[in-house]
Structure formats: C-alpha cells, structure tokens
Image (cartoon, rainbow, N blue to C red):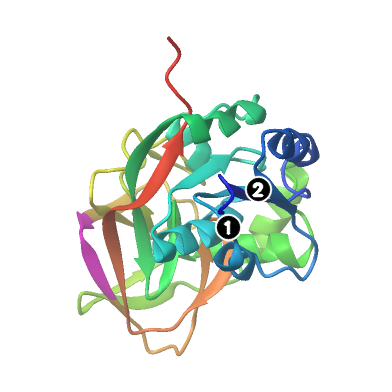
Amino acid sequence: MPERGFLVINPRSGEGAGAEVAEEAKRRGIATHLLEPGDDVQALAREADADALGAGGGDGTLGAVAAVAIERGLPFFVVPVGTRNHFARDLGLDPDDPVSALDALEGTERPVDVGRAGDRLFLNNVSIGLYAGLVREREAHHHRRRGFLVALKALLRSLRHRPTHITIDGRPVRGRLFLASNNYYELKPFALGRRERLDEGRLHLYVAQGLVPLNWEASSGESFAIGSRSRKLRAAFDGEPGDLEPPLDLRIEPQALRVLLPPEPS
C-alpha cells in the first residue's frame, strides 16, 4: 500500500530546520528521507511508493522533485526550509513555520505553471549572463550565505565576464543579463520581487544591457526560441548553476504541477 506522502529534505539548507520537520513528518506517517551527499534526488522520488511527493530545501531541490511529480502524475507539496524560499513564499507558505506546511496533505490542490528550458524544469526562473556568473562564483567559493562583503566580491569577479550574444526568436540580442521567469516578477536591481500569480500561463523574458540592471527590455509569451554561436551558455536554474545547450526552446507548461497547500484558516 502506498505511503500517504514521501518527503525529501536537504538538512543543509536554510537555518537548519530540516531535522525538526523530518521528525514531525515521520510522526505524521509521512515517509521522509534526509538527503546526504551523493544522493540522487530524482531517483529517490521516482522509486518512492507514495500518493504525493514533497521536498524541503533550496528551490533547486524543489524543482528536481517537482519534475518527477509531473512525470508520475502525482501531487507535490513544499516545506519551506531553504535559504530564500522563493517558490514557497509565492505559494503563500510561511518560512517561519515550516512544520505547518505538512498540513498540505490534509489540504487542497492548486495547479500552477512551470517553465522549461529545453528538457529542464524551473519553478522560478532561468538566467544567462551576469546573475548566472554570480551564482557560479558563489558556488566556487562556497559562499551560499548572504553577506555584503561576500556578495560584493562575488559580483566584482562576475563582472569580468563579457556581454552575452544570443538570438531570441531569430533576433540577435546582446546583454549582460537575460532572465526568463515563470509568470510575472516585479524586478529590482539584482533582486526579484514576489509573483502575484503562478497560473498566468506566460513566460516573461527580461534583458538588461548595463553592468547594473536598472533598465530592462521586457517581453512575454508562451515560448521563446534561443540560439547562440556558443555550444554552451552558462546559466542558473532557480539559483543553481547549470548549462544551456542552444538551440533550445524556453516554454511555459500551464498548470502542469499539482501543488498541495494547507487548508485555509477557518
């Protein structure tokens, strides 16, 4: 008989609340796995005999499990124990009370959009250029915690990268930063605001030319064809480093992910 839920938690994410959540999840009869170095997150999710799949950790971990949930046609639930919890916050979950997110298995289902860059899923955004370089610098120097001096040094190193040249739907574009978001973001310099919707059914593509992204060229659509003379483009998927291999399509998959949310307060 399938478990009512299977939850993977990255105990190294956020402020260390993952172990407490794991204990409570087990008490509630939710099969739980604390990730260890070398674990294949997607293999664990594919092998789980459960009626729902859940994840707690950074948005990269969430995206990996969400992709398997879509693949298997299962609902997905989120526990906000990451550092920034962008996706969880946009779902309306409270990062200060991650245990309450386990109530989702007694709650309601809400379909939300996901983005795809080629075959790879993203919940929030995929970026090319300056921000992707900043993410790689952070990873290379093990600076995953926030701090002004750490961020400044990483930014200065990333600025050595030249502007990126790509084509968007066949049109040549040169820029320092390219960002494709799953639904509309309010953008600020080097920061993303909240998304009011996760079911708009549109990608939003933003291009910044300068070293400091104060002005953006913005467009939206259901898909964009990305090309480049480069064989690989350095990218960041939901804040995790990766590569894009052009040509490829960026596209939205409307309401593809069945998210479970805790019941509304009575």
Camera-nearest residue between 6 and 251: 6
Q: Nearer the viewer, residue 252 or 248?
A: 252
Q: CA distance from mark 2 to mark 1?
A: 8 Å
User: Is 34 in the magenta?
Assistant: no
Q: Which residue is mark 1?
A: 60
Q: Nearer the viewer, residue 37 or 238?
A: 37
Q: Main secondary structure of the magenta part?
A: strand
For the question of whether residue 248 can be seen, the reply is: yes
Quarter-of-image position of residue 174: bottom left
> With respect to residue 91, does 171 lie above or below?
below
Placement of 190 over or under 98, stated as above or below:
below
For badge 2, the amino acid type reads Gly
Residue 221: percent from left, percent from top: 19, 58
Query: Dot 2 surroundings within 10 Å: few (below 14), some, or many (20 or more)?
Result: many
Which stretch did the figure color magenta?
220-225
| x, y percent for residue 243 | 52, 77
- For residue 224: magenta? yes
The amino acid type of the residue labelled 1 equals Gly
Residue 194 location, x and y as percent?
42, 35
> In the image, what residue occupies the spot 63% across and 49% down?
7
Q: Quadrant of residue 184?
A: top left
Label 1: state its secondary structure. helix
- Residue at 48%, 56% (x, y): give it: 66
Disc 2: which residue: 57
Is residue 120 found left or right of 251 in the rendered image?
A: right
**Marks 2 and 1 close (CB-CB < 8 Å):** yes
Asked which quadrant contains residue 156, the reply is: bottom right
Quadrant where the image shows the C terminus = top left
Check the picture and name the quadrant holding the N terminus. Answer: bottom right
Measured as percent of width and height from the top left, residue 160 is found at: 61, 70
Residue 133 appears anywhere in the view: no
- Crowding at dot 1, Cα within 10 Å, few <14 / some 14-19 / many 20+, comes out as many
